Structures are given as C-alpha cells and as structure tokens.
Image (cartoon, helix red, strand yellow):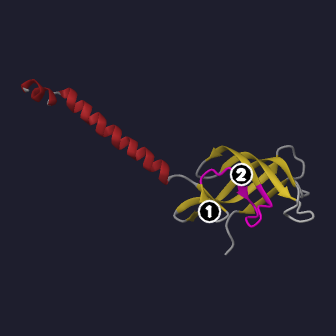
Amino acid sequence: MAKFSKARYSRGWIVLLATLIGLSYGGYTYVHRAITAQVYIENCGHVDYKPKVILKFCADAGVGIADIDWTQWSASQAEGTAKYSANDCNPTCVAGKFSSAEVYVKLSKLKKINGKDAFTYIQVETKDGTPLPLLKSKDDEWSLEMAG
C-alpha cells in the first residue's frame, strides 16, 4: 500500500492528470465553438444546416433545388451544385410535369433568425448556360425569408 501512496504523487500521475484535464477542456472548447459558429439557412420557415433541398415556392414545392452537394460553407457564403426542378402545372399542378437542370448554387445575406446566423438569399445558375426550366434566363434568385 505504501508503494501506491508514493506512486500517486509521482510526476507521472501529475502529468497524466494534467493531460486528461487539458484534453477534456480542449475538446469542450472545440465543440462549443463549432456549434456556436455554425451558419444555417432559412428554408420555408425552418432554420436548417446544410439542407439537401431548398424550395422557392413552399406551398406547393413547384420550384426548388434538390440533391445539393455543398462544396463550400463558411460564415460569409455557401456554394454548391444541385438539380433545379420546376413544375409546369399543366393541366394542373398535381398532374404537371417536372423539368430539371444542373445548377450552381450560392447562398448569401446573413441574418439572425431564432438566435442563429442564417443565410437568407439564394442564387442559382445553370452549369451549361442554357435557360432554366420554364424560364428564359440561365439564372434565378430569391429571398429565403418567409413573408410576414
């Protein structure tokens, strides 16, 4: 028993204890900063992190982007690639046909929403320079904030 008593006061135990305390504090600090520094997106009234789908028309999901692959996500902007889809609503939106195009996506305009920094603006542009489905333009943009 006397050997253990001497050993616990040795430098090895002190170094081990200091290392464990340092790693614990460092891990906590890293995780806390990562969580509080995250930037989100407002998407149809929900605050989300790196969503795979963003809708332009929340009520009927008639236009939006899906299968988003984020290539950059920072506190100033986010960029990626996705598939832009639009419903022609012919003869009705339920029976309509969806057309799609491969696009580049860019998010911007930060705003505090529910205590979180969130992107509130989106820009899309076709990869091949052809017009987007149902539009005469190769690009589209809209506010992600819900009205009212």
Q: Give how far across and how far down residue 117 sits, in percent.
A: 56, 59
Q: Residue at x 60, y 48 (%)?
A: 74
Q: Give how far across and how far down residue 4 sits, in percent.
A: 12, 27
**Which quarter of the image is occupied by the N terminus?**
top left
**Which quarter of the image is occupied by the C terminus?**
bottom right
Indicate yes or no whether the magenta region holds residue 59. Answer: yes
Q: Residue at x 24, y 31 (%)?
A: 15
Q: Give how far across and how far down residue 13 sits, in percent.
A: 21, 30
Which amino acid, mark 2?
Lys
Residue 4 vs residue 30, the one in the foreground: 4
- Horizontal arrangement in the rendering, residue 83 relative to residue 39 (left or right): right
Picture mark count? 2
Q: Give how far across and how far down residue 21 sits, in percent.
A: 29, 39
Indicate yes or no whether the magenta region holds residue 1. Answer: no
The quarter of the picture where residue 145 lies is: bottom right
Q: Which stretch did the figure color magenta?
A: 49-64
State whether the magenta stretch is mostly helix, strand or loop.
Answer: loop
Q: Residue at x 59, y 53 (%)?
A: 49
The quarter of the picture where residue 127 lies is: top right
Residue 106 vs residue 98, the one in the foreground: 98
* Residue ID for mark 2: 106
Which amino acid, mark 1?
His
The numbered mark at residue 46 is: 1
Q: Between tags 2 and 1, which lies in front? A: 1
The numbered mark at residue 85 is: none
- Mark 1 burial class by Cα count in 10 Å: few <14, some 14-19, many 20+: few
Question: What whole-number distance in Å separates the C-alpha atoms at marks 2 and 1?
Answer: 19 Å
Task: Pick out the residue farthest to the top.
Answer: 3
Q: Judge whether 91 appears above or below 25 on screen.
A: below
